[in-house]
Image: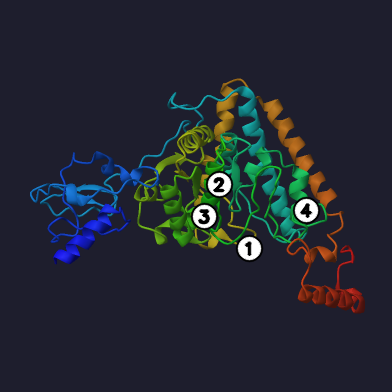
Amino acid sequence: MAMLFSKSRKLINLKTKIGLLLSPNMATPFGILGLNNHPHLASFRFESTKAQTQLNPMHNIIDHHSQVLNFPGGEVKFTSNLNIIPETAEERVHCYRVLDDDGYPITNDFAQIEKEVALKIYTDMVTLQTMDTIFYEAQRQGRISFYVTTLGEEAINIASAAALKTDDFIFPQYREPGVLLWRGFTIQEFAHQLFGNKNDYGKGRQMPIHYGSNKHNYITVSSPVATQLPQAVGAAYALKMDAKNACTIVYFGDGGSSTGDFHAALNFAAVLDAPVIFFCRNNGFAISTPVTDQFRSDGVVTKGQGYGIRSIRVDGNDALAVFTAVQEARKIAVSEHKPVLVEALTYRAGHHSTSDDSTKYRPATEIEWWRTARDPISRFKKWIEREGWLNSEAESELRSNIRKQVLQAIQVAEKVEKPPIKDVFTDVYDVPPANLQEQETFIRETIKRNPQDYPTDVPL
């Protein structure tokens, strides 16, 4: 025992990073200390992950009647009461809003928006809505193969984008084209991507709506659910290491919170103090799976606290509230290098995609109510009209012009030829390996033998 004690003392004196701290009498695995002996330990869990000086438990006087356990990660008080934490709080987390359903402010506690910004928010929401209507119909006509709308979620798209800076990186899911629209991506560029022509930045190799733009710091959409979350955390940590005055924001739906990547990303961000905003569009359904079949927690907002992340619940159909919430979240992320979770409560007023018929799993009357009574564009419009920034004549002209632009963009995009066959095999390897060269030769020969089976607008 004496030899073992001597070796233990040497190891501790050398400040080895052993998780199990042995008490002086070798009888208990953790030193039980008074609350005020080492106050910095109490906040260890919530401070930066910088290496800290290891305390030597041999120097501590043990009080076995103490009510505090000096556990790795912070001091924990003892209690004689068996405390079973309830599965949910008695009252759900409140939802921050600024405008009521009639567009009247219910508080002065919101970020003030100048006229020019307010009008751009409204213009882009109308543009997004118009794009969805016409591009959806284009898919139904067989002119494009697939489409996803953002109906009912226009405020989430545009108002959140307005609260960010251009140096911030966007990691979208697939229902955030409005963020890209706000940053200057044109209607024509959207159309080129949907038609997969040679002007598409993805060279026709992505699904429609898988937008991406290096110029606008908008990472290309990827369909697998929630894979973008840990990627956004890694990018945010890189921004922090490079001392950039920027953050990342990653968008995902309630379904994304049911994945392992969601939990890994939140823990990753909290431990590394990454400047990332997790923005959850809780629209009630993961395709056809309602939130009641996904989790028993109070939505997604409560999950943040479990990982030590500050969280906000906001009315996703209120543009002013979304703008204010994201602006505050960005301040925390950039100035404090801390992650923030934002849950926007909304409703997907359209089908999940053109491959879905949502009336099969929810009432059509429910969809219509959200589309009309809770429309985020109408609510914001009422507010800017009362501010004297918009009138019916300007509104009519705006909608007419946008519709013409979208229709014109479609006509242009569908006449542009497709990317050449060679683009199928490029941009992965500097020098294509032998197997890819063989595949390219094979497909070219096949097309020459059977030209009638291949589209004429795809150059060889």
Query: First in sequence: mark 1 or mark 3?
Result: 3
Type of amino acid under label 3:
Pro
The disc placed on residue 200 is 4
Quick check: 357 left or right of 258?
right
Residue 346 appearing in the image: no
Residue 245 visible from this viewpoint = yes
Three-letter amino acid code at the position of disc 4:
Asp
Which quarter of the image is occupied by the N terminus? bottom left
| Residue 179, image quadrant | top right
Residue with the mark numbered 1: 355
SS of the residue under disc 3? helix
Residue 266 - label: none
Label 2: state its secondary structure.
helix
Give the CA separation, mark 4 to mark 1: 23 Å
Residue 102 drawn at (x, y percent): 50, 31
Q: Cβ–Cβ below 8 Å for labels 4 and 1? A: no
Q: Nearer the viewer, residue 276 or 336?
A: 336
Q: What's the distance in space between the residues labelled 3 and 2, CA to CA?
A: 12 Å
Say which label, 4 or 2, has the lower sequence index: 4
Q: Which residue is mark 2?
A: 238
**Tag in front: 3 or 2:** 2
Specify the amino acid type for callout 1. Answer: Ser
Nearest the viewer among 188 and 382 is 188
| Residue topped by disc 3 | 230
